[in-house]
Image (tube, grey):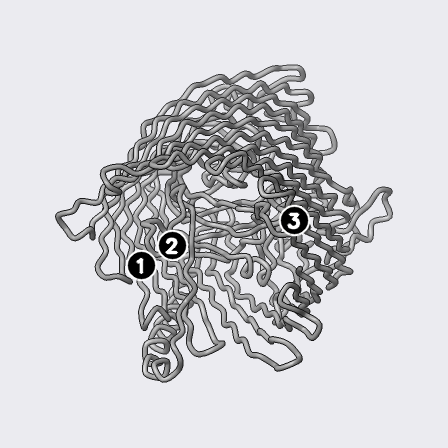
């Protein structure tokens, strides 16, 4: 990697950050001459109770309903480059699963028998598998993204972070929202949400969304049953929710959600060698073709909350089911057919409250998860065929207590968190037709792995209120990811499995609101040390994908988030991440000897760019009887990164411009209803860029989509 190029890009971005801060600072006098303007307060539930974001001693980003609509976010994949230290790319084997990384830590493989470094929650229920996370989630209200190890407040224990998707709940007012969208590649989409109260005790909400598009890479194959690359033949999601209030102190919420997608998988373009194609390929005569894939996810959630005055008891029960059938063409080199069926049951009890006249706040929880999976893989035209069954059980007790001593004018908060987790993992892999030569197995051979893991993970946070608008914190936390098995590996490695991963994380942060709350500036510095790091490593060619405990790693960095109300109608936001990630030890299985060898000096931490930057500007103005006009423009940029641990996966950095213009409260709207029209564009400069680079025996890459545009028609009542 060209270090001079990286430093030049990073220095340029740093200058942009400094210039933005100075511009906001020198504008203080001008701001004072206008009427008082303040940023809207942001309320989050990251610590299981409603709190102001600025008073929560956690590195957290929150996206409101309006931001989700403006940025067109309805799934995990849509969060790509939308927050500090968050990098996302499609998984190599299917575009319905993300390679999700926070602060340089994540997964490169979406399989049935190992845990993710980042937990994803939908209304408090953890999503067990990465497969299906690119599917839409209907009726989103907000998204909260927590960075750093989580466990003393959450059911799942993770080493990188957590993402919470919170959907709208039924309420006591009748409401309706309808949206129609049309855009590039024959995009056709619609959304409908209806909220209906049934008296004072019962309300229901129903939401449905569907979209279709023809994809941006034409598949010109004449084979039967074909689909374009990146096509969404059917992408739909629905959610039905009921809220029942049997008494003033008891709330019962039940919801059923379903997401389904019939799609063409992503396209691998050859970028090196005699068959390389320059530029961005937007059509291909595929010799092996592309068959449609289908993924379906369903879920049930039952939440009961009892407010008993000084304490609140919550019960959250979830059941989720996944059915996945994937067909993948790897650059016409080979085909892969993969199925996965998964069902999971989770239950979590939470007890939270206050004591000692409010000076002590506590959260205590019990968590249990039971998961069963079945997976098959057919690669290389039937020369590598296997099936695997997996079982996973997890149980945990966690607690967090915050004490505010009276001696320091209520400025200090001391928070202690504790968690104990027990996990069991089992896998059985049957080699139906092992890939010759050197597959390490014969047809019919069965490999079984069965292991138990446990961990105690404490956390300590000191928070200090410097002023009414400036808060700081220092935090030490530990994280744990259970060991497991990789069914894509050889018989010996399947039976052996891999160990648990542990992290010690140090973090200091400053959260401030300045200039009469017109500028919000949040800064976090972190230093994470990983031990027994779990690394997914594909061999070349990728007959096997091994998960090994590579050794150790150190990841440190800084995150800055700025939000500002500059003048009446004009606001801006900016984020910047600096990351320094290095392996201390990297033990890898050698292709020839099948032995572990040290390769830390020639391996790079994947999806860990030195810097990321993003920002946006919004301008709003009234146009009299015509309505209210708003204009949003945003920019996202990322430095060079390796898509995998090997240097040949080096992927150039890139920058993307997006924009949206909306006319709201159009003539005919009333106090109870609103009609608005929006025109949007993505990748406005038509930048040619890669999402990832992969060595399939020939160097290949996934490219990002070209410029696209569309129009939204929205009605709310």
Q: Residue at x 29, y 54 (%)?
A: 509
Asked if disc 2 and disc 1 are in contact, CB closer than 8 Å, the reply is: yes
For the residue labelled by badge 1, is the local secondary structure a helix, a strand or a loop? Answer: strand
Q: Position of residue 32 (x, y in %)?
A: 34, 81
Of the numbered discs 3 and 2, the one sitting upstream in the chain is 2
| Cα–Cα gap, marks 1 and 3 | 37 Å
Q: Which residue is mark 3?
A: 195
Question: How many neighbours does mark 1 have within 10 angstroms: few (below 14), some (14-19), or many (20 or more)?
Answer: many
Q: Who is closer to the viewer here, 716 or 281?
A: 716
Q: Position of residue 183 (x, y in %)?
A: 73, 64
For the residue labelled by badge 3, is the local secondary structure a helix, a strand or a loop? Answer: strand
Q: Which residue is mark 2?
A: 53
Left or right placement of residue 127 versus residue 270 in this view = left
| Cα–Cα gap, marks 2 and 1 | 9 Å
Q: Is residue 201 above or below residue 113?
A: below
Q: Nearer the viewer, mark 1 or mark 3?
A: 3
Q: Who is closer to the viewer here, 676 or 651?
A: 676
Q: Who is closer to the viewer here, 56 or 410?
A: 410
| Cα–Cα gap, marks 3 and 2 | 28 Å
Left or right placement of residue 593 versus residue 328 in this view = left
Left or right placement of residue 134 versus residue 209 in this view = left
Of the numbered discs 2 and 1, the one sitting upstream in the chain is 2
Q: Residue at x 21, y 45 (%)?
A: 404
Asked if disc 3 and disc 2 are in contact, CB closer than 8 Å, the reply is: no
């Amino acid at each position: 990697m060209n270090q001079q190029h990286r430093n030049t890009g990073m220095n340029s971005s740093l200058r942009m950050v400094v210039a933005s801060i100075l511009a906001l600072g020198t504008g203080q006098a001008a701001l004072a001459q206008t009427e008082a303007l303040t940023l809207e307060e942001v309320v989050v539930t990251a610590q299981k109770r409603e709190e102001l974001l600025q008073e929560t001693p956690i590195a957290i980003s929150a996206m409101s309903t309006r931001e989700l609509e403006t940025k067109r976010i309805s799934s995990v994949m849509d969060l790509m480059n939308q927050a500090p230290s968050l990098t996302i790319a499609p998984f190599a084997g299917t575009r319905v699963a993300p390679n999700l990384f926070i602060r340089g830590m994540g997964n490169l493989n979406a399989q049935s028998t190992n845990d993710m470094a980042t937990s994803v929650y939908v209304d408090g229920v953890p999503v067990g598998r990465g497969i299906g996370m690119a599917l839409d989630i209907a009726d989103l209200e907000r998204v909260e993204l927590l960075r750093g190890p989580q466990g003393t407040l959450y059911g799942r224990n993770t080493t990188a972070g957590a993402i919470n998707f919170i959907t709208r709940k039924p309420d006591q007012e009748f409401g309706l929202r309808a949206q129609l969208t049309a855009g590039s590649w024959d995009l056709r989409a619609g959304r409908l949400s209806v909220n209906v109260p049934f008296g004072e005790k019962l309300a229901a909400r129903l939401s449905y969304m569907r979209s279709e598009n023809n994809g941006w890479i034409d598949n010109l194959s004449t084979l039967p049953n074909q689909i374009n690359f990146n096509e969404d033949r059917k992408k739909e999601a629905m959610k039905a929710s009921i809220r029942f209030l049997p008494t003033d102190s008891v709330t019962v919420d039940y919801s059923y959600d379903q997401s389904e997608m019939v799609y063409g998988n992503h396209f691998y373009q050859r970028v090196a060698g005699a068959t390389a194609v320059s530029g961005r390929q937007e059509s291909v005569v595929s010799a092996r073709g592309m068959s449609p894939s289908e993924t379906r996810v369903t879920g049930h959630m039952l939440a009961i909350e009892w407010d008993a005055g000084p304490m609140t008891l919550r019960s959250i029960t979830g059941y989720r089911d996944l059915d996945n059938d994937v067909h993948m063409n790897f650059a016409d080199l080979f085909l892969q057919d993969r199925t996965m069926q998964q069902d999971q049951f989770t239950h979590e009890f939470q007890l939270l409250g206050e004591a000692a006249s409010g000076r002590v706040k506590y959260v205590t929880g019990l968590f249990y998860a039971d998961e069963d999976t079945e997976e098959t893989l057919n690669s290389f035209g039937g020369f590598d065929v296997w099936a695997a069954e997996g079982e996973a059980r997890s149980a945990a007790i966690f607690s967090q207590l915050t004490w505010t001593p009276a001696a320091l004018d209520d400025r200090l908060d001391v928070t202690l968190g504790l968690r104990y987790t027990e996990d069991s993992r089992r896998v059985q892999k049957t080699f139906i037709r092992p890939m010759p030569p050197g597959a390490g197995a014969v047809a019919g051979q069965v490999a079984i792995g069965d292991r138990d893991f446990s961990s105690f993970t404490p956390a300590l946070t000191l928070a200090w209120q410097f002023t009414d608008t400036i808060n700081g914190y220092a935090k030490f936390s530990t994280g744990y990811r259970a060991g497991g098995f990789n069914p894509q590996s050889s018989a010996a490695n399947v039976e052996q499995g891999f160990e648990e991963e542990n992290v010690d994380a140090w973090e200091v942060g400053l959260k401030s609101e300045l200039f009469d709350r017109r500028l919000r500036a949040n800064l976090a510095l972190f230093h994470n040390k990983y031990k027994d790091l779990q690394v997914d490593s594909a061999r070349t060619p990728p007959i096997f994908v091994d998960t090994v405990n590579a050794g150790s790693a150190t990841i440190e960095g800084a995150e800055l988030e700025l939000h500002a109300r500059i003048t009446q109608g004009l606001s801006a936001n900016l984020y910047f991440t600096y990351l320094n990630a290095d392996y201390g030890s990297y033990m890898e299985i050698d292709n020839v000897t099948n032995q572990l060898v040290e390769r830390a000096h020639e391996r790079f931490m994947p999806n860990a760019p030195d810097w990321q930057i993003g920002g946006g500007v919004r301008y709003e103005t009234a146009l009299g009887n015509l309505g209210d006009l708003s204009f949003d423009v945003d920019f996202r940029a990322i430095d060079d990164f390796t898509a995998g641990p090997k240097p040949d996966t080096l992927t150039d950095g890139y920058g993307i411009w997006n924009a949206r213009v909306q006319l709201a409260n159009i003539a005919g709207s009333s106090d109870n209803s609103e009609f608005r029209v929006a025109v949007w564009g993505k990748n406005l400069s038509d930048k040619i860029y890669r999402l990832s680079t992969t060595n399939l025996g020939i160097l290949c890459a996934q490219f990002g989509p070209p410029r696209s545009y569309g129009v939204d028609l929205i009605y709310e009542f």
